[in-house]
Image: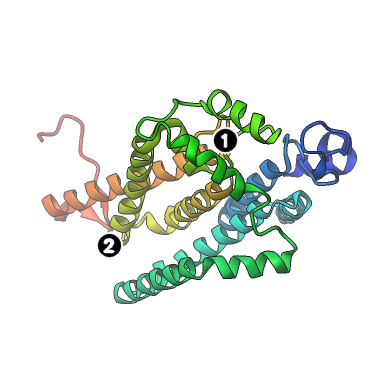
Amino acid sequence: MILSVIFSIFLPKFGVHQSGEWLEPRWAGHWRGIYTHKNTLGNTASFALLMFAIFSKHVIESTVFRKATLIAVGACLFGAASSTGLVVAMVMVAASLGFLLLLNARRGTRTLILGSTFFFLVLAIVTAIPIISVVFEILGKEPDLTGRVPIWGTLLPWALERPWLGYGFSSFELAMLPRFFALTGERLVNAHNGYLETFINFGYLGLAILAAVLISFVRNVVYLLKRQSPYERLILPFAVAIFVGVLCSNITESFFLAYSSIHGVIFAIAYILVAVSRSVTTASVSQRASHPKRLQFGVPSQTPIGAAK
């Protein structure tokens, strides 16, 4: 983020979109920092803000450097003017803070909070279209998500021509781009929707596998919540916020299968953190049940090498 600020301010030829560029000159004046596109900077800054909010006091000793980092992250978020990055950043920070409150609540209160959250989530989905329209009107944005909705409407019928197995991994450039360019004269690098891109590449099979991965993540989180895992306060707020952020960001961008995508990497890290924590918690519970006197504060005692099993 600090490098992106330096590029944008002192090396604007590289760090800022220019009006003379052949690809999307309409973004002239928007920051892209050390990245090739403003949306990449905005989305990367959203994850940087989350990591800063949760871990900065634990890993950055210098108060001056912490403040400089926060200023750099904020400057990149607003300088890129990426609506997706800004919304995802706010959603992830809210999710992490909300989960921290959930962890501090009693078990009965947790159920109430989760039930209320589910109710308001359903209500938000039902009223999403009018609310989004009002928000976009206030922000001066287009209600078609900057032309994305028409793109999806064009690509989906073509994807349905091979619905079960799709066109193959990274097939958008060969299977969809020529047809879309012939129809509209516009060149796309992806479908601007991770779920649609997964369907184009792997059909219903790909969507089923993606759903299985996401459901598995949720099951691991619920397990840790029920077991009152000692690891939950360390990793759950971060992992859940990443999960929510990835789900949201893939609505308007194709990140699930993108090359060199920070979203794919950071989601994999979040999944591993949750899965490993569940494994450790399960082993700890099993050991407490079989050797209660050899455990203290949930930490297994050291067994001498060569001791009988």
Q: Position of residue 53 (x, y in %)?
A: 60, 58
Q: Using the image, determine if residue 309 lies above or below residue 114.
A: above
Give amino acid for label 1: Ser
* Residue name at image x 58 percent, y 54 percent: 50
Q: Position of residue 20 (x, y in %)?
A: 88, 34
Q: Which colouring convention does the figure follow?
A: rainbow
* Residue name at image x 64 percent, y 34 percent: 183
Q: CA distance from mark 2 to mark 1?
A: 33 Å
* Residue name at image x 72 percent, y 69 percent: 138
Between 286 and 146, the one nearer to me in the picture? 146
Q: For the residues carrying marks 2 and 1, which lies nearer the camera in this image?
A: 1
Mark 2 lies on a secondary structure that is helix
Give amino acid for label 2: Lys
Does residue 304 appear in this view?
yes
The residue indicated by pointer 1 is 261
Q: Position of residue 24 (x, y in %)?
A: 77, 38
Mark 1 lies on a secondary structure that is loop
Q: Using the image, determine if residue 206 lies above or below residue 110.
A: above
Question: Which of the labelled discs sits on residue 226, or is there none?
Answer: 2
Q: Position of residue 23 (x, y in %)?
A: 77, 33
Does residue 11 appear in this view?
no
Residue 112 shown left or right of residue 245 in the figure: left
Q: Which class describes the residues within 10 Å of circle 2: few (<14), some (14-19), or many (20+)?
A: few
Between 33 and 277, the one nearer to me in the picture? 33
Q: Say which quarter of the image contains residue 303.
A: top left
Outermost residue to the front: 183
